[in-house]
Image (tube, rainbow, N blue to C red):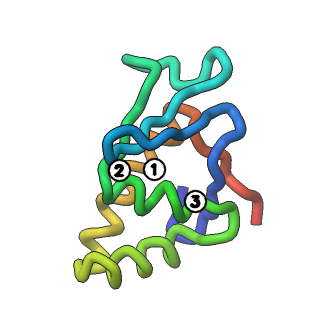
Amino acid sequence: MNIDSVYAISEDVVAHEIEGQLIIVPVTSNVGDMEDELYSLNETGRGVWDRLDGKTSLRDLITQLSEEYEASFQEIEADVFGLMKELLKRKFLVEIPS
């Protein structure tokens, strides 16, 4: 994973909003096979999730979020990379070849 990588949401998961949180649910076996099957995202995590469209690079995604949340690029970058690592580990995302 690098700053110019582009990701899309895997077809093996669905996301539902429940009481303001986004809940990600695997729809096939061996996806999300970590501690628990469901994974929830808060508002900031959802800001990342909603931008994983298979076209937007992580650099552009981080730039958008840093402007939206009025935070430094470096601060948002650290948070985004942490979340991306977890989502990739759970196989919730696929990398789009450049």
Q: Secondary structure at mark 3?
A: loop
Query: Does the CB distance between marks 1 and 2 fall below 8 Å?
Result: yes
Q: Which residue is mark 2?
A: 82
Callout 1, which amino acid? Answer: Met
The residue closer to the viewer here, 95 or 15, is 15
Disc 3/disc 1 C-alpha distance (Å): 10 Å
Q: Residue at x 46, y 20 (%)?
A: 37
The residue closer to the viewer here, 24 or 88, is 24
Callout 3, which amino acid? Answer: Leu
**Vertical side of 13 occupied by 68: above or below:** below
Mark nearest the camera among 3 and 2 is: 3
Disc 1/disc 2 C-alpha distance (Å): 6 Å
Residue 44 image offset from top left, x and y in percent: 32, 59
Q: Which residue is mark 3?
A: 52
Q: Secondary structure at mark 1?
A: helix
Mark nearest the camera among 3 and 1 is: 3
Q: Which residue is mark 1?
A: 84
Q: Callout 2: few (<14), some (14-19), or many (20+) C-alpha neighbours within 10 Å? A: few
Callout 2, which amino acid? Answer: Gly
Q: Secondary structure at mark 2?
A: helix
Query: Does the CB distance between marks 3 and 1 fall below 8 Å?
Result: no
Query: Does the CB distance between marks 3 and 2 fall below 8 Å?
Result: no
Residue 26 image offset from top left, x and y in percent: 58, 26
Which sits earlier in the primary sequence, circle 3 or circle 2?
3
Disc 3/disc 2 C-alpha distance (Å): 15 Å
Q: Residue at x 69, y 61 (%)?
A: 54
Which sits earlier in the primary sequence, circle 3 or circle 1?
3
Residue 1 figure quarter: bottom right
